[in-house]
């Protein structure tokens, strides 16, 4: 929305403070900053990231999202993700449930596979609407390159802190292997007036992969911090990414790295009168990698498994299967009853969390 001044995030709603991590310091190997990142990753699993150097690329992704979403629905639906668990392509608002009762969501997505951007102009998995395809070389690939710099820097640090042999996490996320890694733009329509935090626009979930690099301009993202019963907003900070850990990295580390529940509700206060866009990149493991705690490679992870005997860190599922299952059973078209919702859940599965 070039030229539009958005209202400020209100001061009278509950927010959760995230640690602000400085990517410049992380890259320089600053031990204090690395310790703060580890603290954020092992307590909430969410942090702000400043000095990530991706502002220009992020803005271009917001523009790509706005241009693509402005197409007629019929045109966008030619690139629909379908009901079989594919994640890349177009997802219309209302196609997924936000809870076990099958209430529909209110967000539309355009999701571009990392593999398609690397292969471009060849097609690795699928084609996209014209404004998205046109933006692959100019916006999507440059954004992904920046996101990879951030995410692989973080993966290498976690590898070291978890006591894993050098290169273990990088091999599980080998860029030579096809994966569910993808860039996405998300839109929800203005929801003024009666917009309340009770209307969930994007279901409560943990992320499906390893690391997410998210950019918000308006509020609406909420987290349910550990041992809290109330959701809190994550206030958007200009120029700061919101980074978080997903299920795959949490399972690899036997829960040492936290994959925390979050959801999206209409932007609070006067912000509710505006359409909401967000931009995100998800790093996910290579498709064939099995999601299980890396007990054979790290005494720290082996101990974490021993100390949580009630938990199962052997999913028996590859990263590709985990992603497809989670996408598929959220779809309203696949819904048979509350058990469909349960079938799509991840590490967060707690029947009371909505
Ligand atoms: O739009 C947002 O702020 C959050 C999106 C999100 O959680 C996701 O796409 O996984
Ligand atoms: Fe998410």
Image: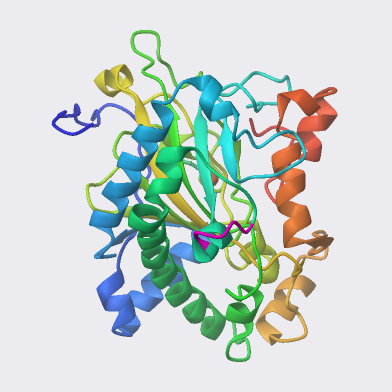
Residue 19 in picture, x, y percent from top left: 34, 59
Residue 156 in picture, x, y percent from top left: 50, 81
* Magenta residue check for 121: yes
Outermost residue, front side: 121
* Magenta residue check for 139: no
What residue is at 62 percent from the left and 49 percent from the top?
126
Q: Is residue 130 left or right of residue 202?
A: left
Residue 79 in picture, x, y percent from top left: 59, 35
Instruction: Tell which of 212 and 19 is nearer to you.
Output: 212
- The answer to which image quadrant residue 312 occupies is bottom right
Q: Which residues are magenta?
A: 120-124
Position of residue 285 relative to residue 13, above or below, is: below
What residue is at 75 percent from the left and 53 percent from the top?
322
Quarter of the image that includes the N terminus: top left
What residue is at 31 percent from the left and 51 percent from the top?
58
What residue is at 43 percent from the left and 43 percent from the top?
132
Residue 44 seen in the current view: no
Q: Is residue 278 left or right of residue 97?
A: left
Instruction: Tell which of 97 and 310 is nearer to you.
Output: 97
Outermost residue, top side: 193
Instruction: Tell which of 259 and 83 is nearer to you.
Output: 83
Quarter of the image that includes the C terminus: top right
């Amino acid at each position: 929305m070039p030229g539009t001044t958005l209202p400020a995030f209100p001061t009278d709603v509950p927010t959760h403070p995230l640690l602000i991590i400085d990517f410049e310091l992380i890259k320089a190997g600053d031990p204090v900053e690395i310790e703060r990142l580890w603290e954020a990753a092992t307590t909430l699993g969410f942090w702000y990231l400043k000095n990530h150097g991706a502002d220009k690329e992020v803005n271009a992704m917001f523009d790509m999202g706005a241009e693509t979403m402005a197409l007629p629905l019929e045109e966008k639906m030619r690139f629909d993700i379908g009901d079989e668990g594919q994640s890349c392509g177009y997802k219309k608002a209302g196609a997924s449930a936000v809870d076990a009762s099958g209430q529909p969501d209110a967000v539309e997505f355009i999701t571009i596979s990392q593999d398609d951007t690397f292969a471009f102009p060849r097609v690795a998995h699928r084609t996209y609407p014209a404004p998205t395809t046109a933006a692959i070389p100019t916006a999507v690939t440059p954004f992904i390159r920046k996101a990879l710099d951030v995410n692989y820097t973080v993966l290498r640090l976690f590898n070291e802190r978890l006591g894993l042999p050098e290169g273990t996490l990088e091999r599980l996320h080998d860029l030579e292997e096809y994966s569910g890694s993808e860039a996405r733009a998300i839109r929800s329509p203005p929801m003024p007036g009666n917009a309340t935090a009770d209307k969930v626009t994007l279901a409560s979930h943990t992320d499906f992969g390893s690391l997410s690099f998210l950019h918000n301009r308006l509020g609406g993202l909420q987290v349910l911090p550990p041992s809290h019963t109330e959701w809190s907003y994550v206030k958007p900070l200009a120029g700061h990414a919101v980074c978080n850990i997903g299920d795959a990295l949490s399972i690899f580390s036997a829960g040492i790295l936290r994959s925390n529940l979050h959801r999206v509700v209409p932007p609070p206060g006067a912000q509710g009168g505006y359409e909401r866009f967000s931009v995100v990149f998800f790093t996910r493991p290579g498709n064939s990698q099995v999601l299980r705690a890396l007990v054979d490679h790290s005494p720290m992870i082996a101990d974490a498994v021993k100390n949580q005997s009630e938990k199962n860190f052997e999913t028996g599922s590859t990263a590709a299967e985990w992603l497809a299952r989670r996408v598929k059973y959220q779809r309203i078209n696949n819904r048979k009853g509350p058990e469909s919702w349960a079938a799509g859940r991840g590490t967060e599965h707690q029947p009371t969390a909505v």
